[in-house]
Amino acid sequence: MAIRPILIHPDPRLKKPAADVDTIDDGIRTLAADMLATMYDAPGIGLAAPQIGVMQRVLVMDCVKDPETNPRPMVLINPQVIAESEDRNVYEEGCLSIPEQYADVERPSEVTVRWLGLDGETHEEHFTGLWATCVQHEIDHLDGVLFIDYLKPLKRQMITRKMQKLKRERARA
C-alpha cells in the first residue's frame, strides 16, 4: 500500500468523467488498497480515483468516525445511484481536493447504490445520513463534479482562488 498524492483543485482531471472499470485485477486491487491508505492518512471519509489522477470509476469510503466502532472500509467499482429519496438533507461538505474549505450542499437524504466489489460480484446497499452524502459526493467526483459546483458562482470563484493560491504556495515550498 502506498500513500498517493491527492490532486488539488483546479486540476483539469478533477472535471473529467472517469471511465468504467472493465476487469477487476491486481491493478484495481492495488489501486483500492492505495486509495484506502491515502484516504485514512489524509484523513478523510471518502476518496475517488480521479482525486489521485486515476481516471477510473473507483471510490473508497469509510464513514465510521467513532474510535470505539470497527472501521468499515468500502470499495465501490462502477457505482450507480439506482434510487434516491425525495427528502433532502443539507450537510457541510469538504473535500480532500479542496482542503480546508467547507460549504453546505443539499442532496437526497437517502440513496440506493449498486456497484461491483473487489470480489467481482454486484452489490447493492441503501445509504442514509453521512454515508448517503459521502457516496453521492464521491460518485460526483467520478462524473467530474465537485461539491463547489453546487455553490453560487461568487462563492465557487472565491474558493477556486484560494486553491490557486495554495497550489502556488506549495509549489514554492
Image: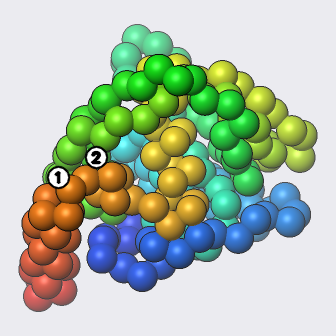
Residue 21 appears at what percent x and percent y? Answer: 78, 64
Mark 2 — residue? Answer: 94
**Placement of the C terminus among the 4 image quadrants:** bottom left
User: Which amino acid, mark 1?
Assistant: Glu
Residue at point 57% right, 60% down? 142
50 left or right of 104?
right
Given residues 119 and 105, the one toward you in this image is 105
Identify residue type, mark 2: Gly
Which residue is found at the position 59% from the left and 70% from the top? 17
At 70% from the left and 47% from the top, the residue drawn is 79
Q: Is residue 110 above or below residue 156?
A: above
Residue 124, position in %: x, y? 77, 30
* Residue 11: x %, y % from top left: 36, 79
- Pointer 1: what residue? 100
Q: Nearer the viewer, residue 86 or 2?
A: 86
Of callouts 1 and 2, which one flags the residue occurring earlier in the amino acid sequence?
2
Q: Residue at x 29, y 57 (%)?
A: 148
Quadrant that contains the N terminus: bottom right
The answer to whether 123 is drawn above or below residue 109 in the figure is below
Work out how far the residue at label 1 is from the one at label 2, CA to CA, in angstroms.
Answer: 7 Å
Residue 30 lies in what quarter of the image? bottom right
Disc 2: CA contacts within 10 A as few (<14), some (14-19) or many (>=20): some
